[in-house]
Amino acid sequence: MRPSPLPEEFSTPGLLTLLELLHFLPDTVAFIKDIQGRYLYGNDTLLRRLRLSDPGALTGKQASDVFPAALGQSYTQQDLVVLTGKTLTEHLELHLYMGGRSGWCLTTKRVLTTPGGQVIGLMGISRDLPVSPSSGSALSEAVTFIHDHYAQPLQIAALAQRTQMSLLTFERQIKRVYGVTPSQLLIRARVEAATRLLQTTDLPVARIAVECGYFDHSAFTRIFRATVGVTPRQYRLLFHQEGLNSGA
């Protein structure tokens, strides 16, 4: 699929060349939106995940038009914050699509401006993260420990000691190998566990928080919403209404 043409103010040679490259990346979603949060461009990866065969079917729509409503509204709210000038850099997110497609990614967004400095929209990318850790090293053993003991009050410094590395070296090596920080790995393991429990049990959200290592219910809700886009209760409702699957 070829991308739809952009409005004239976005059609600079440098940007068009960049989009030509981004359009064919299989593991990265890329998009451009106007100041109302309406899509002007989505690369081939985004279109396929949204099950859209025509790029024009995305143009002019907001996130709530192509994602489950509550998720779309949260994505639009995130866009509006970025449009005020606040940058978003490698934000850990669990993306959920209609039809059950999902996956962890790191999202980065920046505003787009005219040569005179007027904000005209934003551009974002979401880079896929590996589903499973690699094996056969001290780092992988630490990551496995996180996945096996996420319900415990784990300390990153203690995990570093297990690998016989300094905290700084451990954090750098985890980022290099897995693309995320140790704290983000822990959040990912806990949120994946929470989505499974929300899907398969009727446990109260407060109980699920404890089962996933969060003894502060409000902290659990805040972190879940920051990574998934909706609260745990909203996710449970979406799962039953939309047939979502965390893929965890």
Image (spheres, rainbow, N blue to C red):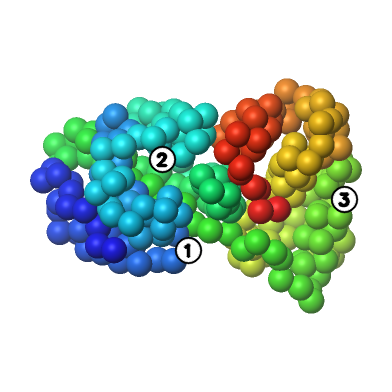
Label located before the other in sequence (2 or 3): 2
Q: From the top left corner, tell me how far across and down residue 98 is, in percent.
A: 51, 45
| Type of the residue with mark 1 | Asp
Residue position marked by numbered label 1 in the rendering:
27
Q: For this rendering, which residue is in front, 125 or 56?
A: 56
Q: In this view, does 120 lie to the left or right of 52?
A: left
Q: Is residue 43 visible?
A: no
Q: In the picture shown, does residue 15 fall above or below 121?
A: below
Mark 2 residue element: helix
Residue 143 location, quadrant: bottom right
Mark 1 residue element: loop
Residue 44 location, quadrant: bottom left
Q: Which of marks 1 and 3 is in front?
A: 1
Label located before the other in sequence (1 or 3): 1
Q: In the picture shown, does residue 207 fall above or below 104?
A: above
Residue at coordinates 41% horizontally, 58% vertically from top-left? 48
Q: How crowded is mark 2: few (under 14 residues within 10 Å), some or many (20 or more)?
A: some
Label located before the other in sequence (2 or 1): 1
Residue at coordinates 86% horizontally, 43% vertically from top-left? 151
Residue at coordinates 83% horizontally, 47% vertically from top-left? 150
Q: In the picture shown, does residue 187 fall above or below 218?
A: below
Residue position marked by numbered label 2 in the rendering:
66
Residue position marked by numbered label 3 in the rendering:
149
Query: Distance between the Cα atoms at labels 2 and 3?
Result: 36 Å
Q: From the top left corner, tell me how far across and down residue 12 is, in percent.
A: 15, 53
Mark 1–mark 3 contact, CB under 8 Å? no
Query: Distance between the Cα atoms at labels 2 and 1?
Result: 20 Å
Residue 49 location, quadrant: bottom left
Q: From the top left corner, tell me how far across and down residue 35 is, in percent.
A: 27, 31
